[in-house]
Structure formats: C-alpha cells, structure tokens
Amino acid sequence: MSPVIETTDLVKQYGDVCAVDQITLSVEKGSLFGLLGPNGSGKTTMIKMLTGQTKPTAGTAMVLGFDVVADPINVRRQVGIIPEQETPPSFLTAREYLAFVGAIRKIPDIGAKADRWFDLLDFADKRDILCKDLSRGTRQKLMFAQAFIHEPELALIDEPLINFDPIMQDLVKEYLVDYVRKGKTIFLSTHILEVAEEICSEFAILHKGRLLHTGRVAELSENGGDLPSFFLSLVRKGSHV
Amino acid sequence: MFELFVAMVKEEWRIHSTMFGTLSFALFPVMIFGIACMGSFLIPLVQMTLPPGYLTLSIHGSYLMLGIMVGGFGLLGNEVMNRRFGQASLLAYSARSLPLKETFIFLNFVIKDTVYYFFLWVLPFGFGYIIASPFIGVPLTDSLLLLLTLTFSFLFGLCTVFLLSAVYARSKEVLWLLLIAAGFGIVVHAVLSGTNPVLFFPPLLLNSSFSWMNFTLSSVLLLLLFGVATALFNPESVGSTKRYTDAFTPLLKCLSSLPTPSLAAKDILDLRRSGGLIGQTIFSFFLPLLVIWFFLSLLDPIFPPHGLLFLTAIITGVIASTMYTWVTMFDTFGSYACLPVAVSTLITSKITTFGLLQVIPVIFIASIAVLSGETAYIFPAAILAISVSFYAAGVMVWLSGLSPGVLVYDVKVLFTYLILVGIALTLFTGLAFANPYYAFFALSLAIPAWFFIQRAKVRWDAVDPGGF
C-alpha cells in the first residue's frame, strides 16, 4: 500500500500560538483514517493544511503525490473536502450548487449524479430552495454530496456527522465504510470517539497541536482496550504533562 | 440599550483593527484630519477662482454622498445583516439568542453606524478645518458651524438611504413610486421656480444663514427620517421555502465564452437574488451620482465647455469602479475552500462580472449626455467613464484582492489608492477639459489596469488564504 497522505514535521503557527507542532504522519491508501483530538487540538488546521486552505509555517505535506504548498489546486482537484464551517453559497439552490460544483470540477452528466445524491441523502424535496433557507442538517447533506459527487480517491472530512440526525448518521457511516471498501481513502477528523471506533481502521490522536499516538483500532480491541478509554487516558496524561 | 451600543462599537472597531492592526486603523482618521487641515490652507487660493459659496456646496455634496454610500452599503432588503456580516456571528444576530427585538437591535445598529462613521470620517475632517481656520482668517464660529452642517449632510445621506432601503425591503413597487414621485416633484419645482433644488438642501440653508429655527427644522426632519426607517424596518426572514427553477445552467451556457463562466454565473445570481443588483444600482450608484450631478450643475458656469459632462463621466468612472465591491461582498475565499479554485481565478471571475456590470455606467453617462443636450459627446464621455472605472478597479484589486470593502480602511491601502487614482483623474480631467475628444486618450488606462490586475493575481495567490 502506498501512502496517500504524507507529512513531515508539519508546523502551523498563528502568532504566538502553535496550532500544529511538528506532525509527521502517513495515511495508507484504502484506509478510513480518524484524526482525533479535543476541541482546539489542531484537527481542523491539519485538514486546512492538507487541502491547501492554509499554508504550513514549516514542514512538508504531500497529498496524492502533490505538494500542498506548491500545488494546492491540483490537491483540491483530486480530493473531496467537507470543511468544518463553510456552507454552500446563499443564493444558489441546492440543485444549482451541485451544478456549479460540476462545472468547476468538469463532472460529466452532473444533473443525473446530483439527482442520485438528492435521493440517497433524502433531500430531493429541498433541491430547488436557496441554500440560505436550508436547515443546517440539509446544508451538511449538500456539502457531503459536493465532496463525493466526483468520486475522489481521497476525501478529507472535518466533523462529518455533527449536524445529522441519528438516521442520517447511520446512513453516512455506512456510506463511508462502503466507500473505503472500493479502495478509496477517507481522512476524517472528529471528537466523537464512538464514531471513530465504529468505522475507522486507523487513527491518530492530537492534543494541543502535538501528535500523541498513531495506531490501528483493531490493535486496541485485540489488547482488550477501547478507543474512548485509551483516548481519555492519553489526553489526560498529556494535559497533566 | 447603552450596553448593546457600546458592544457594537467595540465590535466594529475590532473587526477593522484586527484586519489592519490597531495602529494602522487608528491612523485612518488622523489621515483624514491631515488632508482636511492641509487642504484648508488652499481655500484662499481656490476661492480666487470659485464663486463664493461653491466650495461649501461641493463639500456638503461630498458629505451627503458619503452618508448615502455608508448607508447604502449592505443595508438592502431582508439580507441586511447577512450581507453585511456574512457568516460571522455578531451582535447584529443577537435577537436569536438574547431577549431583544430585531427593531431594537436595528436602532442600535443605525446609531452605532452614525456615531462610528462620524468619528471616522466627519469629525476628523471638521476638526482639521477648525485647526486651520485661524491661519486662513476664518472665524471659529464659522468652522464650528461647518462641522455641524457637514454632520447634518452626512446624516441626511445616511438616514435617507436607511429609509429607502427599509421601504425597499417591504415593497419594491412602493419604493419605485416614491422615487418617481420625488423625482417628478423636484423637476416640477425646478422648472416652475427656475432654481436648482439643491439650494434647498437643509444643511446648506443652515450653513448659509444659521438660525435656531432652521436648526430645529433640520433636526426634526432627520429624526423623522430615522424614526420612520426604524419603524418600517423588516427583520430578516428566516426559513423561506420559496422554490426557484434552475437559472444557473442556462446562464452558464449563455456565459460560456467568458473566462470563468461558472463563477460569473454564480456572481450574477448572487446579485440578482439578493436584490443587490437593483438595490446597489439605485443606492450606491444612481442616487449618489444624481446628487453629484445636481451639485456639479451649479458649478457649470466655471467649467470649460462640456466640462460638466466630462467631469461627471470621470466621477461616474470612479463610482462605477466600486462595483467591484458589489461582486466581492457575497463570499470570501473560504467559500471556495472545497473546490479547485485559486485566488487568481476568483479575481478573474470577479473582474469578468465587474465588466458585465459596466453597462450600467455606460447607460448612465449616455443618459446624462442626452439630458444635458450633449449627445454628440456620448462616445468620448462613455469611453472616459469606463476607462477610469477599469483603471480604478485594477488599482483596487491590486491593493485589496478579494476584500476591497474592508481593506479600504487600511490607511496604507487608502493612501496608495488615492495617489494612484488621483494622478490619473487629474491628468484625464485636464485632457478632457482641453478638448472633449482627448477623452479617447483614456483608453490608454487599459494598460496599467491590465498590469495591476496581473500583479494582483500573483500577489494574492502568494498570500495565505487562511489569512483573508
């Protein structure tokens, strides 16, 4: 397996605050990788750097063979992204937004593909409403659809389930697991540990910008442990230090 | 009330000072003060060429326009707060989480804008004049009176636009009726009395002959405008389920020959559906320009032949260049974070949409040429306006990238903009005054405009997008 994401001593400094501190990480193709950490641990900054939304202060990062600093557009062309806070443009309808994404990404037959996503995520009745008038959950569905509509080799998702109801959460989790089975890769950040334990194959724990641990979820259970307990003990220890 | 007001002022200050640094932003009113103070020493020279009262008229016109533009920016339709603040969670949204009425928040918002921009623009200018007045032989009472009447001019512009935008948010038809009735009334009065209606502008009347009666009448009129605007304010509607047919796909086909058709189509839909295209055209373009044209028409006797038309064309160009802010105010680079779009691509798309909007200044200046009986000069006047507009927009793009609406308050940005645009304006005003057909030389502005846009793409691509 070849790594689809490789970072070396990646650093992001905001003034005096070090949001990400010398992270060296490798994510293999075909994995469902969970980046875990408490609020403010640097998860969102990591995803922003890996997708060329913000530039690292130091270190290097390669995504699908592209340097995120030298070639951020090619990175974003190849991957699917769901940013943490961004919402779709206010004055386009849901259908128009997917057509807009299709035009930018040059996706053929975008209308039919969009319809499949409206049906899959059960919001076909909202497709002609302006994005600004959609509920938060429906906007999240739309953002989910735009990230996967071109079936990228790698999707980077920031807190994917946070606005979904339990039924939709279940559907999305199932979709992500199936997606990885097709040989694609998912890199998701979350602080919902139960979700990570349920669907992720590998994980990394960030705390205060530093990488505390990387490993396989299966290894934890083989050793009689579970991810939430392991995470809490590690982070508490890290806070104490 | 006072707590919310203070918090809103702090918030506005922090938005600006966070972007430019506290010192850089604090220097902005200092620069206005400096310009006014130094400019005041030129007044004796200017008065040798201008008839008495004309300078006062021009300054009052400028401050009326300033009020109109400050009020017009963002205060349109039901998207008032969203448009002005984007996705930011600011105090303007506090009705959603605090037990406060929308109208109460709007009232605070209006008063905050008034006080904030008074200290940012009006007071520094007036104070600069007051400081200079003993050295140019102007009595202190006259300069204090000017500060008062300039404040009134600014407030008249501000609250007139608040009122019109509040009416617009309720009913576009009523707004059109109101504007047509007002325009008709002004024209009829001007024809019947043979005097320019601008001379009845309350702050000007107050400045020319101060009396407590005039002062009280002006104040009551202002309070009335504020009161009616607040009463008519229509809070942002939430959760509308209005359905729209797909307008994006046909528009995309229609614009397919442009460099970035999908982004341009989105910009046009943003403008159309937000009400911004009509609203901004009325409040931030036609209204200020008509006011300027009225004021300038009083100065017509001192201009060379056709001078009024070409000066109006140049000013139209400058104001038309602000259309770049119309197309950049709906989104930040963050909105495109999940797509393979570079900042330089966005700049290209915004300039493309800006180019499409330039049909508005062409129509305006052509109408002015026809109305003033100078149809023969439509072509050079339109070329002058459009060339100035593209040049000034090019400078704006180079200096501020995708954030012209906020970076204008960075003192370094504003100063550089004023110098670069001021030189071009002076040169081409002189040429057009010398011979109307020399206005065609303004086409040469396309070269620096293109250069600035190309440099802007390189410059803003290199900036960390997270820093926008």
Image (cartoon, coloured by chain):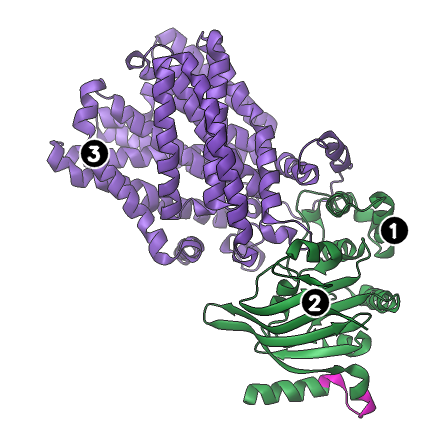
Chain colours: A green, B purple
In this picture, which residue range is highlighted in magenta?
A221-228
Q: What number is the disc on residue A159? A: 2
**Does the magenta-highlighted stretch encompass residue A224?**
yes
Instruction: Identify the residue under disc 3.
Output: B40
* Figure check: B243 above or below B440: below
The mark nearer the N terminus, 2 or 1, is 1
Task: Check disc 2 and report its element: helix, strand or loop.
Answer: loop
| Mark 3 vs mark 1, CA separation in Å | 68 Å
Residue B125 in percent (x, y) is at 27, 39
Looking at the image, residue A151 sits to the left or right of residue B122; the answer is right
Instruction: Identify the residue under disc 1.
Output: A116
Q: Residue furthest bottom?
A: A224
B432 or B49: nearer the viewer:
B432
* Subunit that carries the residue with mark 2: A
Residue B225 in percent (x, y) is at 42, 34
Q: Amino acid at mark 2?
A: Glu
Given contact means CB atoms under 8 Å apart, are the residues at marks 3 and 1 in contact?
no
Q: Amino acid at mark 3?
A: Ser
| Mark 2 vs mark 1, CA separation in Å | 23 Å
* Subunit that carries the residue with mark 3: B
B271 or B75: nearer the viewer:
B271
Callouts 2 and 3 on one subunit: no
Task: Check disc 3 and report its element: helix, strand or loop.
Answer: helix
